[in-house]
Structure formats: structure tokens, C-alpha cells
Amino acid sequence: MPKQRQPGKFWPRVRPMIWEKAQELYQMEQAKTMGNDFKGITATRKELREGGYFYMAKLIVLRNLWLEKKGLPCIEEEETMHACNSE
């Protein structure tokens, strides 16, 4: 009988972060395109995958985790620093 694999520690922790970021990206795009008509509708997981939001969120979250591990500022922190410096 094959051994049952132990659940990992990385992906169970990271997956919710990716879904949250995907929803955030979806909401941001909806707010841009709909203007004043934006209602804050949440997308289904299927819509997030089909629209490419999940993939983009995965790249962003993994990059931020890698930068955090290296002790570098994440993407959002870097954008904030550039915005403060340009004022």
C-alpha cells in the first residue's frame, strides 16, 4: 500500500493569498472600466481563472514572498516609495 503524502506547509498557506489577490485585481479592473457604475461584485473562482486573474495574482504573490524572503521591499511597498519620492 503506498504511503500517504504529508500535506505541505507552503501551498496551503499561499493559496488563500493568491485567491485574495486575484479578487483584488478583478475588483480594481472592474472599478476602472465601470467608473461610477461599479458595484463591488466579487467574481467566482472559475471567472478568476478564465480571466487570467488567478495566474497574474499567483505571479505577484510568489514574487512578493520571494522578495520578502530576500529582505527586499515587495511590489506595493516599492510603488508607495516611488509615489512619496515623486511628490
Image: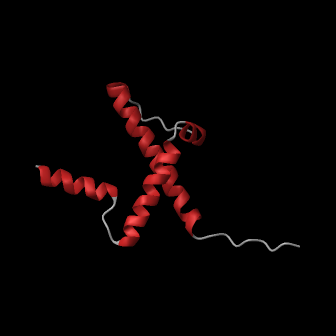
The percent position of residue 62, horizontal first and vertical second, equals 46, 59
Question: Which residue is at 53% across, 56% downward?
Answer: 16
Residue 33, by quadrant, is top left
Q: Residue furthest right?
A: 1
The percent position of residue 9, horizontal first and vertical second, equals 58, 71
Residue nearest the observer in this picture, 37 or 15 = 15
Tell me: residue 76, above or below residue 73. above
Residue nearest the observer in this picture, 61 or 13 = 61
How many numbered marks are there? 0
Tell me: residue 51, above or below residue 74. above
Tell me: residue 7, above or below residue 17. below
Question: Which residue is at 19% across, 50% downward?
Answer: 83
Question: Which residue is at 84% across, 72% downward?
Answer: 2
**Quadrant where the N terminus lies?**
bottom right
Left or right: residue 79 versus residue 67 is left
Question: Which residue is at 15% across, 54% downward?
Answer: 84
